[in-house]
C-alpha cells in the first residue's frame, strides 16, 4: 500500500514539490536567477532538486514518515547517519554541496548568491524560516531517536550528540559571524567541481 509506506509517501511528496517548484519558476518567475539554464542543464537541476526534496523530507520529518512498524532500529540508525552526513558536509564544504551544484548548473557565479532554486522556487517568501525549522527538526529527530535504549550504547549517544552539535553549531555560527554569502568562493573541492563542469561545457 502507498499510504503508510514512508518510501512511497516521501517520493510522492517530493514529486509534487518538484512539479510545483517548476511551475512557480517558469510561469510565475519565482526564482533567484534571471535566466533559466539550457534544457539539458535544467533537466539535471530538476533531478537534483527532486533528490534534494527527498533528503529534506527524510532528514527533517523522519518521525512523521517512519512511524509504527517502520520505526525500526535500522531506519533510526539510518536517520542518524543521514543527519550526520548532512552536517559533516556543511562543515567540509561550508555550505550544502547539493545546493551548490544545483545553482552551478544555472551557469552563474554561485558564491554571489545566498539561496538556491530548490528552496526559493517552492517556499519563497518563507524559505529562510522553513530552513530554520528544518534545522530544529533535525534536533527533534535526534532527541526522539535517542530515547530508544537499544539505538546506541550510552557512550555512543554522548559521542554522537556532541559531535553532531559541534558541526551543526559551528556552521550556524560561522555563517552568522562571517556575514558572507551562502556559498564559499574558495572551497577547493567545490572549485574543482566547478572547473570540471566549466571544462566540459
Image (cartoon, rainbow, N blue to C red):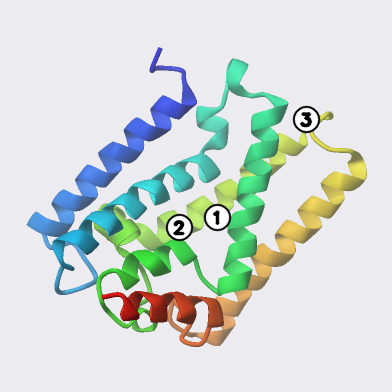
Q: Nearer the viewer, residue 179 or 100?
A: 100
Residue at image location 46% in from the left, 28% down from the top: 7
- Residue 131, numbered label: 2
Residue drawn at x 40%, y 26% is 8
In the picture provided, is 38 more to the left or to the right than 135?
left
Are circles 2 and 1 on residues that touch, CB within 8 Å? yes
Distance from Cα at disc 2 to Cα at disc 3: 27 Å
Q: Dot 1 surroundings within 10 Å: few (below 14), some, or many (20 or more)?
A: some
| Placement of 68 over or under 166, stated as above or below | above
Label disc, if present, on residue 183 of the rendered structure: none
Label 3 crowd (10 A; few <14 / some 14-19 / many >=20): few
Q: Which quadrant is the N terminus positioned in?
A: top left
Q: Is residue 148 left or right of residue 43?
A: right
- Label 2 element class: helix
Rendered-image quadrant of the C terminus:
bottom left
Residue that carries the numbered disc 3 in the rendered image: 148
Amino acid at each position: 500500500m502507498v499510504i503508510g509506506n514512508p518510501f512511497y509517501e516521501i517520493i510522492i511528496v517530493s514529486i509534487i514539490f518538484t512539479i510545483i517548484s517548476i511551475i512557480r519558476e517558469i510561469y510565475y518567475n519565482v526564482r533567484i536567477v534571471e535566466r533559466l539554464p539550457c534544457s539539458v542543464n535544467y533537466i539535471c537541476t530538476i533531478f537534483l532538486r527532486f533528490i534534494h526534496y527527498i533528503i529534506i523530507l527524510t532528514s527533517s520529518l523522519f518521525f512523521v514518515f517512519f512511524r509504527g512498524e517502520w520505526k525500526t532500529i535500522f531506519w533510526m540508525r539510518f536517520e542518524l547517519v543521514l543527519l550526520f552526513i548532512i552536517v559533516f558536509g556543511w562543515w567540509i564544504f561550508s555550505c550544502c554541496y547539493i545546493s551548490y551544484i544545483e545553482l552551478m548548473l544555472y551557469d552563474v557565479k554561485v558564491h554571489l548568491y545566498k539561496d538556491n532554486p530548490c528552496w526559493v522556487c517552492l517556499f519563497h517568501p518563507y524559505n529562510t524560516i522553513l530552513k530554520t525549522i528544518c534545522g530544529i527538526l533535525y534536533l527533534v529527530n535526534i532527541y526522539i531517536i535517542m530515547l530508544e535504549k537499544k539505538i546506541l550504547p550510552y557512550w555512543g549517544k554522548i559521542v554522537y550528540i556532541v559531535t553532531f552539535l559541534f558541526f551543526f553549531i559551528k556552521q550556524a555560527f560561522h555563517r552568522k559571524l562571517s556575514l558572507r554569502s551562502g556559498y564559499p568562493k574558495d572551497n577547493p573541492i567545490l572549485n574543482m567541481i566547478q572547473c570540471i563542469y566549466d571544462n566540459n561545457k
